[in-house]
Image (cartoon, rainbow, N blue to C red):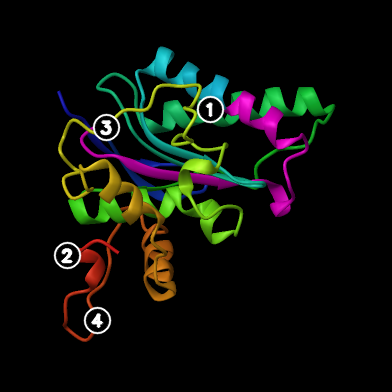
């Protein structure tokens, strides 16, 4: 049975918690400094903690990318466990393990996680691409499959990645070559800014411009 609730989180911001739609979730390190461990070690820790979310909370992971001071997660909750419960565990576990390995006691993240509910098919497709293109925008690679701190690394992640059962990924190209080509095509800067701004809203929503439909609402970028 689907659940829908409006909950107040630690940052006193209202989020809609439901298992009917996926979320984009992100957080960055305190003061935006790099992680206190080598990225290979941080990645192993994140992979371990993501596997725990799958096992313990039946959480569905659709995409995950770790950068040098932040992460992006695209996923969906099960019937039994809400996002706040899942993310509290994830943030606490990653903080404790990374800090212990680094010999630190300071907080790892700058604050509570941020999330945006993704309801529409075009929105999901464009956010999916936006997440996987983080290393491309940082000029770390020109192919999302070559970035090893990603759920879609060509050699495979260390946790199970699923596709949404709801069909919200309807507009993502199904043919492999077309999908890879599209995911590697740069997002125009103006569209990138619109996506980033929309992800700050509790439900992803792109405003129309001068009463004209915004491209993000009806096509792939």
Of pointers 2 and 1, the one earlier in the residue sequence = 1
The one nearer the camera, 60 or 172, is 172
Q: For this view, does 44 lie left or right of residue 104?
A: left
Q: CA distance from mark 1 to mark 3?
A: 21 Å
Residue 102 on image: x %, y %: 81, 29
Q: CA distance from mark 2 to mark 1?
A: 34 Å
Of pointers 1 and 3, the one earlier in the residue sequence = 1
Is disc 4 placed on a helix, strand or loop? Answer: loop
Q: Which mark is residue 218?
A: 2
| Residue 212 versus residue 2 in the image, above or below | below
Residue 215 on image: x %, y %: 23, 71
Query: Is residue 33 something that shows in the picture?
Result: yes
Say which residue label 3 marks: 163
Say which residue label 4 marks: 209
Q: CA distance from mark 3 to mark 2?
A: 21 Å
Of pointers 1 and 4, the one earlier in the residue sequence = 1
Q: Is residue 37 magenta?
A: yes
The one nearer the camera, 214 or 27, is 214
Kindly check if marks 2 and 4 are in contact, taking CB atoms under 8 A apart as contact.
no
Q: CA distance from mark 2 to mark 4?
A: 13 Å
Q: CA distance from mark 1 to mark 4?
A: 38 Å
The one nearer the camera, 116 or 101, is 101
Q: Is label 2 or label 4 in front?
A: 2
Q: Is label 3 or label 4 in front?
A: 3
Is disc 2 placed on a helix, strand or loop? Answer: loop
Q: Which residues are magenta?
A: 19-46
Say which residue label 1 marks: 90
Residue 214 on image: x %, y %: 22, 73
Of pointers 3 and 2, the one earlier in the residue sequence = 3
Q: For this view, does 192 lie left or right of residue 218?
A: right
């Amino acid at each position: 049975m689907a659940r829908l609730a409006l909950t107040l989180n630690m940052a006193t911001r209202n989020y809609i918690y439901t298992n009917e739609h996926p979320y984009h979730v992100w957080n960055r390190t305190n003061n935006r400094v790099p992680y206190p461990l080598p990225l290979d070690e941080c990645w192993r820790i994140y992979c371990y903690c993501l596997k725990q979310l799958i096992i313990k909370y039946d959480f569905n992971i659709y995409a995950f990318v770790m950068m040098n001071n932040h992460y992006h997660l695209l996923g969906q909750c099960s019937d039994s466990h809400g996002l706040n419960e899942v993310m509290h565990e994830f943030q606490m576990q990653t903080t404790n393990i990374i800090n212990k390995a680094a010999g630190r006691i300071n907080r790892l993240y700058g604050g509570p996680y941020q999330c945006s509910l993704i309801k529409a098919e075009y929105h999901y497709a464009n956010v999916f691409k936006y997440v996987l293109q983080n290393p491309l925008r940082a000029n770390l690679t020109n192919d999302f499959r070559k970035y090893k701190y990603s759920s879609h690394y060509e050699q495979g992640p260390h946790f199970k990645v699923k596709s949404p059962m709801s069909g919200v990924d309807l507009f993502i190209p199904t043919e492999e070559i077309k999908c890879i080509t599209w995911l590697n095509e740069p997002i125009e800067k103006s569209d990138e800014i619109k996506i980033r701004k929309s992800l700050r809203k509790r439900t992803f929503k792109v405003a129309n411009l001068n009463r004209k439909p915004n491209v993000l609402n009806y096509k792939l970028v």
